[in-house]
Image: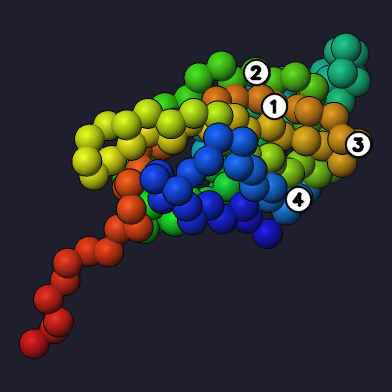
């Protein structure tokens, strides 16, 4: 289940929140992300090496957790123009293979752009199955002030 955000800029309220469903991070996720990104650091890809680290096991890549957040926190194309940026991303607690994460999104700010657009500012927390925060970030979206409906002529 995604946190589907369908509120145009003018209707956003500071403190408004959404929560996604959970997603269990799998071995296949980690290996496929290693292949996709070329990030074969041993902390992600070598179980034997990881036995002697402070974590004792492989970690899910922080950038993968962030990417899953993007998938589980979806914004309607009727309100979203573009991803505007990410700030203050922190990985607070390791995510391990087999952990389940969910995401809590909160509106923390609004900035007028012009008569058609505004920038919505959001804080997102990733929470694991034990209730521990694993990631915290702030992001911004360029948004339509009102729900966007493209002008399309009917097909001839």
User: What's the distance in space between the residues labelled 1 and 3, CA to CA?
Assistant: 14 Å
Who's the residue at 86% across and 25% down the image?
57
Please tell me which of labels 4 and 2 falls first in the chain: 4
Q: Which label sits on residue 22?
A: 4
Task: Check disc 1 and report the residue beneath it.
Answer: 135
Who's the residue at 76% across and 27% down the image?
134
Who's the residue at 43% across and 31% down the image?
110
**Labels 1 & 2 near each other (Cβ < 8 A):** yes
Please tell me which of labels 4 and 1 falls first in the chain: 4
Name the secondary structure under disc 1: strand
User: What's the distance in space between the residues labelled 3 and 2, CA to CA?
Assistant: 19 Å
Name the secondary structure under disc 2: strand
**Left or right of 28 in this view: 34:** left
User: What's the distance in space between the residues labelled 4 and 2, CA to CA?
Assistant: 20 Å
Depth check: give the residue in front, 127 or 7: 7
Name the secondary structure under disc 3: loop
Who's the residue at 55% across and 29% down the image?
108
């Amino acid at each position: 289940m995604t946190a589907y955000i369908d509120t145009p800029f003018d209707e956003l309220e500071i403190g408004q929140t959404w929560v996604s469903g959970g997603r269990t991070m799998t071995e296949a996720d980690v290996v496929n992300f290693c292949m996709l990104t070329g990030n074969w650091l041993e902390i992600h890809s070598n179980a034997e090496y990881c036995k002697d680290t402070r974590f004792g096991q492989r970690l899910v890549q922080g950038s993968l957790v962030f990417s899953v957040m993007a998938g589980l926190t979806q914004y309607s194309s009727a309100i979203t123009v573009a991803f505007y940026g990410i700030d203050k991303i922190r990985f607070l607690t390791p995510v391990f293979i087999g952990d389940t994460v969910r995401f809590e999104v909160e509106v923390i700010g609004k900035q007028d752009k012009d008569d058609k657009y505004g920038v919505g500012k959001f804080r997102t927390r990733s929470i694991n199955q034990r209730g521990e925060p694993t990631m915290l970030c702030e992001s911004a979206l360029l948004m339509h002030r009102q729900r966007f409906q493209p002008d399309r002529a009917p097909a001839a």
